[in-house]
Amino acid sequence: MDIINTTLNSLPYSNPLPLFFAVYLTLYTVAYFIIFRKWVPKLRPEASSCVISLAHGTPAVFLASAAILSDPARDFHSPNTPFQSIVLDYSIAYFLMDLLHYLIFYPTDLLFIGHHLATLFVFLTCRYVVYHGAFAILVLLVLAEVTSLCQNVWTLACARRSDVKFAAKVYDLLSPPFYGLYSVVRGFLGPYFVYRMFAFYMSGAADSVIPKWVWISWVVVVFMAISVSILWILNRWIEFFSERNNNVAVAVAADKKVR
């Protein structure tokens, strides 16, 4: 890990954000016009969004974890390392691209647009305003994206389960473990880390490098995001058990009819 930091510190300063954004834009364009060209028009934007989410999510987990572990002075108010700044730019580029996707195709989806704007605010202030606190933000990034692979595969399967049998099987097989992992991460690990984050900042230990208005806004944004995530997964569990009960009822009725 020391080798990574030494190498990054020796590089001339450059901002990789435009390059990352160009990569996401290219991936989205290829997905929309080539990979999913035969899909019905209403599904192509969502599927293309899943592609860039796949390109961001799991790599971001590994990159953020490496950036955290490579920082010997990691703490809630420690200075951002060059590696951490690159990971922040990597995520900023993704959320900018996905925000553009929503503004073009789903301009009335105010929940996701608001989510992306709030997330960008957190990343941008950490990266370009206070230059501290990347440890906390990257841990939250790991917790948010560790379910990304499952969620994107689940989303794609859900989109085609009505007309593709294989997609329906993937959806049915993946739903319980995905819901379980999501529930643990967003319902327990996330709130616990936010509590630790809030307790540290409330102590005033970070006030000299992270203004109160910044860390308070971070905590508020993360709290709201986790609350929405918990409501979302609760609705998924309700739908899951409702569908399961309906299937059991149909099977019982069919069995009685045969008898």
Image (cartoon, helix red, strand yellow):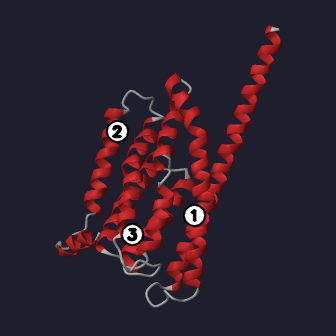
Give me the disc on residue 31.
2
Location of the N terminus (image quadrant): bottom left
Q: Position of residue 217 (x, y in %)?
A: 54, 75
Q: Amino acid at mark 1?
A: Gly
| Front tag of 2 and 3 | 3
For the residue carrying disc 1, how many other residues have a C-alpha within 10 Å: few (<14), some (14-19), or many (20+)?
many
Give me the disc on residue 68.
3
- Count how many numbered circles sit on residues in the image: 3
| Front tag of 1 and 3 | 3
Q: Is residue 210 visible?
A: yes
Location of the C terminus (image quadrant): top right
- Secondary structure, mark 1, is helix
Residue pictured at 35% horizontal, 67% vertical:
67
For the residue carrying disc 3, how many other residues have a C-alpha within 10 Å: few (<14), some (14-19), or many (20+)?
many
Instruction: State which tag comes first along the sequence, 1 or 3.
Output: 3
Left or right: 87, with 150 as reference point: left
- Secondary structure, mark 3, is helix
Find disc 1 in the rendering and name its residue. 190
